[in-house]
Image (cartoon, helix red, strand yellow):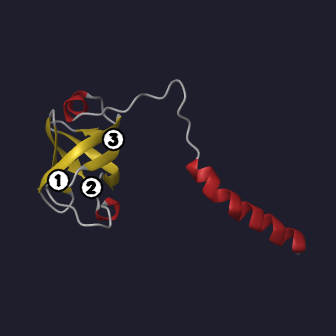
């Protein structure tokens, strides 16, 4: 019984560390860092954008702007930061390009407010 408790405790403690591991060495594509580059990138390309949301289009879609242009970014409610943001808030959005027949957008996985 004691051995089972020790094994379960060890397994539970190792889970958070395994979730943080990510390979970043050779072979990992560099993230696109501008709206202009994201619009030309292939579907599912990882991106990191820095800029501002200029307006909300609907419940999950926003118009995002950086120095190179604007594009639609899809952000689910759970991905939005806890603090309030407005059109003057500088943000970092990490996600991936979603190419469709007539449009290109970014599906956000992480949204951070920058100082």
Decide if residue 99 is on the left or right side of residue 102: right
Precedes in sequence: disc 1 or disc 3: 1
The alpha-carbon separation of the residues under discs 1 and 2 comes to 7 Å
Q: Residue furthest right?
A: 2
Give above or below for 26 relative to 74. above
Decide if residue 41 is on the left or right side of residue 67: right
What residue would you read off at disc 3?
Answer: 96
**Residue 109 coordinates in the image, percent (x, y):** 36, 51
**Residue 78 coordinates in the image, percent (x, y):** 34, 64
Which SS class for mark 2?
A: loop
The alpha-carbon separation of the residues under discs 1 and 3 comes to 15 Å
What residue would you read off at disc 1?
Answer: 62
Precedes in sequence: disc 3 or disc 2: 2
Mark 2 Cα shell of 10 Å, populated few (<14), some (14-19), many (≥20): many
Q: Which mark is residue 75?
A: 2
Residues at circles 1 and 2 in contact by the CB criterion of under 8 Å: yes
Precedes in sequence: disc 1 or disc 2: 1
Determine which quarter of the picture holds residue 48: top left
Q: Residue furthest bottom?
A: 1
Residues at circles 1 and 3 in contact by the CB criterion of under 8 Å: no
For the point 63% across and 53% down, the residue is: 17
Which SS class for mark 1?
A: strand
Mark 1 Cα shell of 10 Å, populated few (<14), some (14-19), many (≥20): some
| Quarter of the figure with the N terminus | bottom right
Q: Which mark is residue 79?
A: none
**Residue 50 coordinates in the image, percent (x, y):** 26, 42
Residues at circles 3 and 2 in contact by the CB criterion of under 8 Å: no
For the point 16% across and 60% down, the residue is: 86
Which SS class for mark 3?
A: strand
**Residue 111 coordinates in the image, percent (x, y):** 32, 53
Determine which quarter of the picture holds residue 65: top left
């Amino acid at each position: 019984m004691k051995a089972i408790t020790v094994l379960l405790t060890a397994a539970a403690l190792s889970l958070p560390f395994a979730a943080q591991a990510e390979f970043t060495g050779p072979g990992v594509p560099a993230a696109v860092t501008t709206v202009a580059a994201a619009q030309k990138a292939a579907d599912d390309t990882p991106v990191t954008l820095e800029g501002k949301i200029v307006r909300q289009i609907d419940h999950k879609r926003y118009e995002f702007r950086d120095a190179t242009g604007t594009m639609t970014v899809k952000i689910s409610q759970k991905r939005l930061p806890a603090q309030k943001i407005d059109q003057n808030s500088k943000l970092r959005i990490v996600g991936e390009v979603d190419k469709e027949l007539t449009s290109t957008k970014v599906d956000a996985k992480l949204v951070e407010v920058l100082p």
